[in-house]
Amino acid sequence: MKKQLILLAALSVAFTGCMKPTTHSIGAALMPAPIMHRSSPDSSVQELSVAASGFYGHSGDGYNLENLNAFGGNIGLTYRMAGTLSPLFLNVAAGVFGGSLHFGCDASHRCLRDSEFDKDYVAWLESKAGRKSYSFWNLQERILVGADFSPAFLIVGGAIGFQLYEGSSDYDRMRNRLGNEGLMDSRGKNSGVDITSSVWLGTYLGRRGQFGNLVAEYDVIFKDKYDDAMASIKWTYTHPSGFFGGFARGDLIDFSLFVGKQFVF
C-alpha cells in the first residue's frame, strides 16, 4: 500500500505539476525571547541586563503542521553603552524548547488540497504515520547588534545579527524520510545559521516610564530562498520592576505567550 501511494503521488506530480508540501525544522522559527529596552527614556548610563523568560507556543493548522504545542525557556544578556553611544547595544540569547505536533497540509504553503497528490499524501500519513503525535526539541542561540532610541516618550530602533538552531527529533526524522521518498520538500537541515533582523516601535507609559513600556517588535529570518523567510511580531509590556510579558504571532509557531523577569546591573 505504501509503495502504491508513493507511486501515485509521484505520477500525480509528474502529470499535474502539483507542488510538494514544504517543511522546515521547528528550530527555524523566530526565537520567542523579546528584545528588552531601557526602563527610563532619559537614561544614558552603561548597563548590563539579564532577562529570563518562559513561553508556550501553539499552531492549530498552518505551514503543513497541525496541533503544534511547544514549551520552553530563554535567557538573554544585553550590554548597553554609555554617553553619546548609549543607544548602541549587544544582545546574546539562548534557549531550549520542545513539544509535539502532527503533520498537516496547508494550501498556502505548496499543498494543493484539491489535487490527487494531496489526497495520496494525506492518505499515506494517515495509514503509515497514523497521524500520531511527533515529538521535537531544539536549542536556539541569537546574537544581535543594534541601536535603541528614545525620542520623547517613544521607543524606536533596529538590530541585525544571526540566529542559530540545533535539534533532532521524531518530527525531523519523519520529514527527512518524506523528503527522501519524494512526498515532501523538506527544506533545511536539523541545524543551521540564519541572518535575522528586528525593528520595533513602542512607548513609555507615564512620566519617565513610571508605568513601564509597551513595544511592538517585528522580526525576520532570511533563508536561502526568498519565499522561505520567516517572520513574527511580538507585543511586550515591561513593568519598571523588570517583570515582562506578552504574546507573539509568527510562522511555524503561530501563537505564543511569554513571561519573564529582567535584572539590570
Image: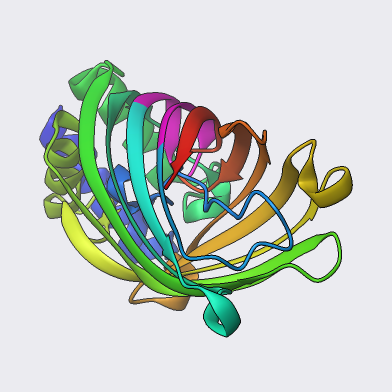
Q: Is residue 189 visible?
A: no
Q: Quadrant of the N terminus?
A: top left
Most common secondary structure along the magenta stretch: strand
Closer to us: 33 or 110: 33
Return the x and y of residue 26 as percentages of the image width and height: 32, 43
Return the x and y of residue 107 as percentages of the image width and height: 56, 47
Q: Is residue 66 visible?
A: yes
- Name the residue at 19% across, 52% down: 179
Residue 69 lies in what quarter of the image? top left
Q: Is residue 249 left or right of residue 110?
A: right
- Name the residue at 35% across, 54% down: 12
Closer to us: 252 or 221: 221
Residue 235 lies in what quarter of the image? top right
Residue 244 lies in what quarter of the image? top right
Q: Is residue 181 left or right of residue 254?
A: left
Judge whether residue 56 is colored magenta: yes
Return the x and y of residue 197 as percentages of the image width and height: 49, 70
Identify whether 100 is placed above or below 13. above
**Magenta extent:** 52-71
**Farthest residue in the bottom direction?**
84
Identify whether 109 is placed above or below 253. below
Return the x and y of residue 49 as percentages of the image width and height: 42, 49
Q: Is residue 122 left or right of residue 46?
A: left
Judge whether residue 35 is colored magenta: no
